[in-house]
Amino acid sequence: MNRKQKILTGIALGALFSTVAFAPWQIVMKSDAQIIGTWTKYSPLFLPPDFGDGEARLMTQVMLFEWTGLAIAYGGVFLMLRGKPRDHNTTP
């Protein structure tokens, strides 16, 4: 792994951490089986927001889309930064 790939890996891990630290949650407020309102709140993945009478649901499709996009982008750029292979059969 060369220096550019190491830097890319650090950036990708930071982006992955930010998606975990700021996971999207859909908040649904209900009153007698009638939805009063919905909105999105960003909260850590393993710490759902507490809204008393409201219901918090993790937006898993959004998380899957984010992680898939990060994986594809990381893989593509990682391969582009691979560089040329060395020829080990040459004699000095």
Image: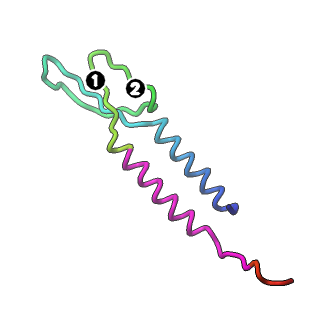
Q: Residue at x 84, y 84 (%)?
A: 91
57 relative to 75 in the view: left or right: left
Residue 30 against residue 22 in the figure, above or below: above
Looking at the image, which residue sits at the far bottom? 91
Q: Secondary structure at mark 2?
A: loop
Q: CA distance from mark 2 to mark 1?
A: 10 Å
15, 71: nearer the viewer:
71
Q: Is residue 76 covered in magenta?
A: yes
Asked if residue 80 is among those painted magenta in the image, a careful observer would answer yes
Residue 63, quarter of the rendered image: top left
Q: Position of residue 56 (x, y in %)?
A: 31, 26
Q: Position of residue 7 (x, y in %)?
A: 64, 56
**Amino acid bearing label 1:** Glu
Q: Amino acid at mark 2?
A: Pro
Q: What are the residue bounds of the magenta stretch?
A: 64-87
Position above or below: 80 against 34? below
Q: Main secondary structure of the magenta part?
A: helix
Q: Which comes sooner in the sequence, label 2 or label 1?
A: 2
Residue 46: x and y in percent read 45, 29
**In-front residue for pair 50/37:** 50
Q: Callout 2: 10 Å neighbours few (<14), some, many (20+)?
A: some
Residue 65's disc is none
- Mark 1 lies on a secondary structure that is strand
Residue pictured at 69% horizontal, 63% vertical: 2
Q: Which residue is mark 1?
A: 55
Give residue 25's quadrant in the image.
Answer: top left
Per the rendering, the mark at residue 48 is 2
Tell me, what colour scheme is on the image? rainbow
Q: Is residue 44 above or below residue 65?
A: above
Residue for point 46% across, 31% down: 44
- Count of marks placed on residues: 2
- Residue at 44% over, 32% down: 45
